[in-house]
Amino acid sequence: MVALKAMKKIERLTTSMESAAASASLSAEAALLNAQAIHDSQRPWLLITVEPSPRIEDTFSIIATNRGHTPATIVSTAEGIEFAVDESHLPPIPSYGELRSPRVPIILLPGESTPVESFSRDEGRRICETEERFKRVANWEEKVFISGKVVYRDLIAPGAKQLHETTWCCWYIHGRQKSGLVLAGPPSYNMHT
């Protein structure tokens, strides 16, 4: 009987220890998720804006700004051009040219910006390739969409979580006397990872 009582106590103790170990495991998992959420909120986030050139009329710069809390370095960029009647007629997945790396590493501290692409009225005429297409663009029968991707590295994240992407899309507006470039496009063209 003494041995039986001892076995029951050992069984209760083992069950209690298993329960404590499971609770500790769940607590550790929750702490890890919390730490990851804090890290993600502190990581770099590159956001895209369009600004007119202060020096050259009808020229625009696509600017990447680090709105996160930690430094980022731009690894590569790519651009693509699509012609469509409107945003709803764009291909579902954007098509970019080849990814290319900057000649000199571009490191953006929080709040810093850098141009990633520029576009001018003269380029609007050149990319149309034919006079017929250019007339359709000038008459707003067809629109020019310039899209791109910026791949950047989080300088403080562990290896597997370092790379992020920001995609963007702009509509080039060819006016009779002046031109414009505004952010546009469907959500699949304007994403952040």
Image (cartoon, rainbow, N blue to C red):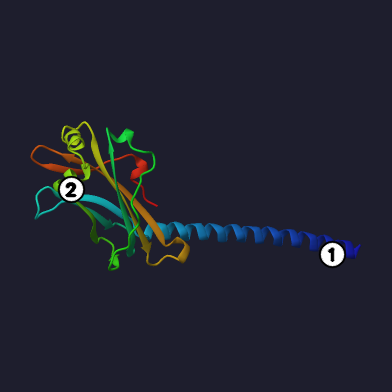
Q: Name the quadrant containing residue 179.
A: top left
Q: Is residue 103 above or below residue 124?
A: below
Residue underneath mark 2: 123
Q: Amino acid at mark 1?
A: Ala
Q: Position of residue 184 (x, y in %)?
A: 27, 41
Residue at horizontal 38 percent and vertical 39 percent from the top? 92
Relative height, residue 62 to residue 139 (above, below):
below
Mark carried by residue 6: 1
- Seen at 70% across and 62% down, the residue is 17
Tell me the quadrant of the picture where the N terminus can be found.
bottom right
Q: Residue at x 42, y 60 (%)?
A: 39
How many numbered discs, if any? 2
Quarter-wise, where is residue 146 in the image?
top left
Closer-to-camera residue (159/177): 177
- Quarter location, residue 107: bottom left
Q: Amino acid at mark 2?
A: Glu
Q: Is residue 9 above or below residue 188?
A: below
Give the SS element for disc 1. helix
Q: Nearer the viewer, residue 42 or 81?
A: 81
Q: Secondary structure at mark 2?
A: helix
Residue 69 seen by the camera: no
